[in-house]
Image (tube, grey):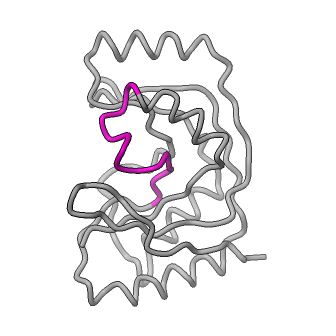
Amino acid sequence: MNIGVVLFPSKRIQDFANSYRKRYDSKYALITPHITMRERINIDDTELDSIVTALNKVAEQTKPVSLHIQGARSFHPTNNVLFLKVMPTDELEQLHQALHTGDLSHTPKYDFLPHITIGQDLSDVELFDVLERLKMEDIRFQEDVTKMALLYELENGSWSVYETFRFTGQ
């Protein structure tokens, strides 16, 4: 079973992201706009209970996390992904580290670059055209996220919430 851990932004940010995703994201129908905190990994179903327990511990030690979104960027030339830039913060970095150490020990495939994907599988021309238009917009959002979600992947490639974990740290 494939699982991942994400933060879901507010409906306001999701609506903004989806206004682009509908047209530019080939995976629009498979998952809600999100910030990946722990990338997809394949686990045995028997591991799920211990992962849930570990995620509960992380949530109990985590305060709500501030998100600051500023502008749009791309991963070009590595790949043609267009995203909303989530400004890195100590809070996000600490949460990311907590989700990869201890009982959740795992070495991430990529460096942590918080973002919300709004386009992927674009041609170079389309990517640069959309990115240039987005650079003319003053894209700024700020909010606190109070929970994280454990997702699992269905056979059709879509993702569903298995459980959410409210941040209750002091």
* Residue stretch in magenta: 23-37
Q: Going by the image, does 89 lie left or right of 52?
A: right
Rendered image quadrant of residue 29: top left
User: Magenta includes 31?
Assistant: yes
Percent position of residue 137, x then y: 63, 16
**Does residue 15 sit above or below 128 in this rendering?**
below
Q: Quadrant of the N terminus?
A: bottom left
Using the rendered view, name the quadrant where residue 23 is placed. top left
Q: Residue 155 in the image: x percent, y percent?
A: 20, 62
Residue at image coords 65%, 73%: 166
Quarter holding the C terminus is bottom right
Quadrant in the picture for residue 86: top right
Looking at the image, which is closer to me, 92 or 18? 18
Q: Residue at x 53, y 26 (%)?
A: 72
Q: Is residue 168 left or right of residue 109?
A: right
Q: Main secondary structure of the magenta part?
A: loop
